[in-house]
């Protein structure tokens, strides 16, 4: 049987560490690991070359090996040994390495190499773009654009690599390999590095964003070809080997693990989409139903060590050897993504979080969820007329505090957690003791249609409500009730959503008339000043301000999320990816994360500072009607018209 070969292009300037990376990878995996897979390089010449390079790395009396000057093409066969030491070839990885000068030099002895190089890139299955960790360290330390190493990184290395990556096909996996991670670890995380690269390199930002929008796999992978404490950085920028130290490289196998898993997923999808079966992948039906099911089992920690031992014992041919290798590589990638959750910049996430609790006590659609200020308790309301309180850590129901007389109950709680506010289909707002459920004041009744949303001021003295009667009402709460002090009737349709900025000075309202109206608060001269109407292509169902008040996010029926700058009221960017209307939004208190819920039955989690998708949460079987973050930014609650609430750990 012909085994699959994956062409991997390595990009990087001279000194970035491509040669050392490849030699260390081969040395690390040239003999069977405890997991019984290993790499064999084709050709005795290539084997000796890589061994010689590695000897120069570990010999303290020798200089670091020189980089690649000519085109090199090395094919590694990935094999699996079973318990009887029978060898089975699973796949091949062909590393195509070009001298760093092809990226950065203007005059080259062989221009044919350049042409050939640029033709190879679009046909690669994966691209490893090597970012020199030493140059990156200089950028992160001082952000000194006059530093020569920093100038090379920003003005030569990245622009040239991005131009070539822009030639890649949609299914090509792009991995930005941060070499020499031992210099950066402990001082910087991947989010800080990504943000810095985006800020200082428009080329990086634009190419990465375009691939993310297309759903392409894009990742940041930190590696070290020598490991910690093998060499130390000198004042002149050189690395000095420590006498007696032994290299301990780490995460070198992660890129090839991603190449295989991405490749298998792509080929399985192609087989399903094609009228002609792909014979090789059709065989996988007998091994496992789908790669997605294996990934799901890993998320649930069902594929523990005994299962991996079982898969090894079953290795008897190519098919079972591939299954074992997939399981082993998924284990490595799950460990990697748990350690570096920020590594995935875009595309399909392998290990999307599973809910830590599924709460199923409501009998009808869940209308709203929220956390108490300490994040330990979740409250929820439903069309079943109840408000329930839950223990977040255990997922247990604590109490049923309210039994309304009509359905479609919305709930909110005061900052001191003492007052519970509800609105229901009877068009009224009520205030309760959050501990006992005792009613405090007479119901507030001024709307002529059901209330769609409301917010309460921090001091509990003012309440703002929106309704299907096309109005927004501002209430002054008093000891025995409350009164409407302003009624806003500028909308020409249902008012579905409203949000108030954290400083209490701006009100946003939106609905079926496709307009988001911005109002100035507080009241001046007994009048509200509507100073802006921001039009959308479709109805607006959800609004959310960031906690610093610098951004307002709107969710639209056109499947798009709009992020607005509240200083200029210009659109910062659109977030696209949902395949249904946006029904709910929530922003974490640290303003780093946005969650969006849709009638496509998914929740998408976005990096709000970069506008990139972090992960997609699945599991609900109905529209995601409501979302809320805990105050520590680590927990997300979602409610749906499937009658359930799910609690997710978002780190």
Image (cartoon, rainbow, N blue to C red):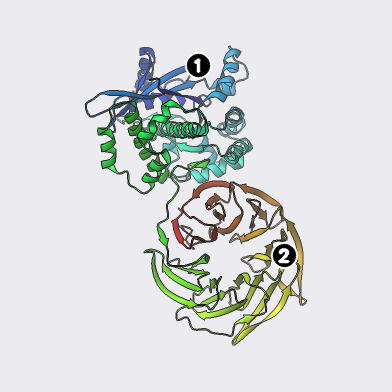
User: Relative to 266, is 334 on the left or the right?
Assistant: left
Q: Nearer the viewer, residue 80 or 175?
A: 80
Q: Which quarter of the figure has residue 540?
A: bottom right
Identity of the residue drawn at 68% across and 64% down: 508
- Tell me if I can see residue 383 in this picture: yes
Residue 343 position in % (x across, y down): 48, 42
User: Relative to 199, is 321 on the left or the right?
Assistant: left
Q: Which dot, 1 or 2, sits closer to the camera?
A: 2
User: Relative to 49, is 603 on the left or the right?
Assistant: right
Residue 462 position in % (x across, y down): 63, 77
- Comes first in the chain, label 1 or label 2: 1
Q: Nearer the viewer, residue 625 or 284?
A: 284
Identity of the residue drawn at 52% across and 83% down: 439
Q: Secondary structure at mark 2?
A: loop
Residue 647 position in % (x across, y down): 44, 59
Can you say whether 304 is above or below 490 in the image?
A: above
Which residue in the rendered view is the most extreme toward the front?
Answer: 275
Q: Nearer the viewer, residue 220 or 21?
A: 220
- Tell me if I can see residue 248 in this picture: no
**Mark 2 and mark 1 in contact (Cβ < 8 Å)?**
no
Can you say whether 309 is above or below 562 in the image?
A: above
**Label 1: which residue?**
71
Q: Nearer the viewer, residue 189 or 76?
A: 76
Q: Residues within 10 Å of mark 2 (few under 14, many from 20)?
A: some
Q: Secondary structure at mark 1?
A: loop
**Label 2: which residue?**
493
Q: Quadrant of the N terminus?
A: top left
Residue 128 position in % (x across, y down): 49, 29
Can you say whether 224 is above or below 542 in the image?
A: above
């Amino acid at each position: 049987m012909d085994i699959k070969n994956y062409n991997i292009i390595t990009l990087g300037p001279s000194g970035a560490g491509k040669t050392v990376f490849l030699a260390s990878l081969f040395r690390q995996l040239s003999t069977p690991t405890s997991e019984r897979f290993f790499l064999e390089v084709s050709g005795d010449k290539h084997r000796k070359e890589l061994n010689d390079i590695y000897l120069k790395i570990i010999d303290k009396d020798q200089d670091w090996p020189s980089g690649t000057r000519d085109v090199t093409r090395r094919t590694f066969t990935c094999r699996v040994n079973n318990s009887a030491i029978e060898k089975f070839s699973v796949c091949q990885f062909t590393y195509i390495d070009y001298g760093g000068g092809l990226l950065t030099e203007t005059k080259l002895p062989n221009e044919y190499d350049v042409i050939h190089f640029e033709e190879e890139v679009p046909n690669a299955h994966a691209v490893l773009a090597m970012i020199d960790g030493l140059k990156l360290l200089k950028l992160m330390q001082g952000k000194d654009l006059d530093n020569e190493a920093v100038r090379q990184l920003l003005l030569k290395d990245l622009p040239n690599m991005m131009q070539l990556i822009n030639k890649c096909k949609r299914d090509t996996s792009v991995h930005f390999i941060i070499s020499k991670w031992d210099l950066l670890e402990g001082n910087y995380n991947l989010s800080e590095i990504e943000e810095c690269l985006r800020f200082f390199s428009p080329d990086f930002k634009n190419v990465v964003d375009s691939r993310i929008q297309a759903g392409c796999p894009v990742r940041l992978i930190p590696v070290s070809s020598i490991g910690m404490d093998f060499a130390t950085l000198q004042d002149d920028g050189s690395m000095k080997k420590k006498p007696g130290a032994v290299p301990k490289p780490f995460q070198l196998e992660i890129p090839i693990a991603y190449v295989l898993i991405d490749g298998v997923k792509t080929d399985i999808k192609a087989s399903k989409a094609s009228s002609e079966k792909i014979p090789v992948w059709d065989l996988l039906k007998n091994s496992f139903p789908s790669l997605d099911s294996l990934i799901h089992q890993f998320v649930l920690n069902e594929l523990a060590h005994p299962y991996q031992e079982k898969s090894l014992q079953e290795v008897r041919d190519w098919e079972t050897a591939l299954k074992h290798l997939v399981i082993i590589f998924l284990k490595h990638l799950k460990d990697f993504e748990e350690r570096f959750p920020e590594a995935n910049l875009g595309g399909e996430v392998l290990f999307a979080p599973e809910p830590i609790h599924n709460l199923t006590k409501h009998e009808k659609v869940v209308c709203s969820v929220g956390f108490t200020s300490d994040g330990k308790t979740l409250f929820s309301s439903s069309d079943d007329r109840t408000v329930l309180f839950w223990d977040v850590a255990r997922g247990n129901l604590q109490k049923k505090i309210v039994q309304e007389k009509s359905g479609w109950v919305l709930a909110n709680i005061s900052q001191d957690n003492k007052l519970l506010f509800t609105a229901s289909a009877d068009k009224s707002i009520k205030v309760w003791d959050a501990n006992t459920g005792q009613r405090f004041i007479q119901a507030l009744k001024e709307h002529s249609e059901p209330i769609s949303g409301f917010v309460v001021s921090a001091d509990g003295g003012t309440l703002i409500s929106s309704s299907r009667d096309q109005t927004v009402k501002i209430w002054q709460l008093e000891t025995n009730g409350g009164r409407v002090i302003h009624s806003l009737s500028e909308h020409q349709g249902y008012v579905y959503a409203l949000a108030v900025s954290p400083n209490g000075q701006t009100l946003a309202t939106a609905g079926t008339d496709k307009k988001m109206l911005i109002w100035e608060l507080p009241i001046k001269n007994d009048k509200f000043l509507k100073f802006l109407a921001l039009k959308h292509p479709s109805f607006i169902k959800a609004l959310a301000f960031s906690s610093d008040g610098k951004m307002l996010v709107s969710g639209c029926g056109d499947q798009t999320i709009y992020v607005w700058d509240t200083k200029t009221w210009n659109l910062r960017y659109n977030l696209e990816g949902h395949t249904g209307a946006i029904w709910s939004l929530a922003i974490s208190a640290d303003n780093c994360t946005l969650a969006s819920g849709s009638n496509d039955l998914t929740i998408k989690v976005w990096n709000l500072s970069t506008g990139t998708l972090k992960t997609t949460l699945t599991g609900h079987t109905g529209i995601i009607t409501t979302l809320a973050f805990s105050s520590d930014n680590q927990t997300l609650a979602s409610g749906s018209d499937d009658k359930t609430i799910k609690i997710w750990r978002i780190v």
